[in-house]
Amino acid sequence: MENITDRAENPLLREMCQYVLSNHGKRVRPALCLLAFHALGGQDTSKAVDIGAAIEIIHNATLIHDDINDAGEIRRGAKALYKEYSLGRSIVAGDFMFALGFQLMGATSQEVVNFVIDAAAAMGSGEFDQKKMEHNVRADEAEYLKIITGKTARLLECAAKCGAYVAAPEDFDKIVALGNFAFNIGMSFQIIDDLLDIIGDQSNTGKLVGNDIVEGKPTLPIIYGMRDPTVGIRIMDIFEDDRTDYNAAGEAITLIKRTDAIDRCYNLANYYADKAIAELGPIPDSVYKQALIDFAKFIVSRDR
């Protein structure tokens, strides 16, 4: 995927794009795109590979802007792009990568482009809703689920639907089933991702533990912790304060671990993973379907 950045004529812009893409993430979205493609009997992978790469590039473009918006300094164990280079140049690099992703899809069908446009709009809405709720102690589970629907689940749904559509454009029910599978995977994935900000290890996650508390992001373990009758008030005090540092976040994490928040997060993540697997009923048995099932189970047990 790094070779795609050769389309950037400016050497520094190309270097910045390579910096982002060479710092490999989980690449869940292209994996879902390809698995959905093969699950419906797709043969020529070239178009599915291009679509998966395009979606991953668009995803990374949003992460560049997210880090700037959140003042996040670490991404996947390395400096955020704007910390390594500059704020203004990083904004432009994010814009370029966003455009590059859509350019890469230029040879695909309008339906695929529409899937991605809808998902990109949902991402923007989800990120905006999250920003609006920063340091808000009244945030609840329903608002959190709405946020992660937009910022995470819709793009995973899009990736699977794109791969499925390229393989079997006429098989509407199976395209929808694979999209629903990936949507629920996205919900489970984000719940676990947010939980790892509380119970994870920086050497595995590549980011500072307690970062969401410092940034005031109302994630599910924080929301559940704030509702605890014993320690919830203190967690609220820490979360509400926009001057909260990592020492205070560490105190909040200790308190959250004393509540039932972690178990409740795992329960909900498992619920979405099970729901995802149930959506695969119409999909023919194959090694690719089994890989999707295994992927759903892995999502909940991962530590990074």
Image (cartoon, rainbow, N blue to C red):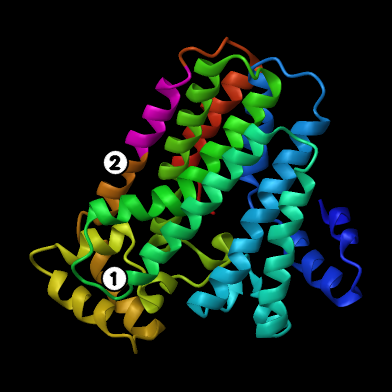
Image check: 46 left or right of 204?
right
Image check: 226 left or right of 143?
left
Residue 237 shown in magenta: no
Q: Is residue 102 above or below residue 254?
A: above
Image check: 171 left or right of 21?
left
Question: Where are the magenta residues, as a range?
Answer: 270-280
Residue under label 2, please give it. 267
Single out the residue that lies furthest toward the left.
229
Q: How far apart are the alpha carbons under marks 2 and 1?
A: 20 Å
- Amino acid at dot 1: Thr
Residue at x 27% of width, y 48% of height:
263
From this viewpoint, is residue 192 visible? no
Crowding around mark 1 (Cα neighbors within 10 Å: few <14, some 14 to 19, many 20+) is some
SS state under label 2: helix
Q: Nearer the viewer, residue 151 or 202?
A: 151
Residue under label 1, please give it. 254
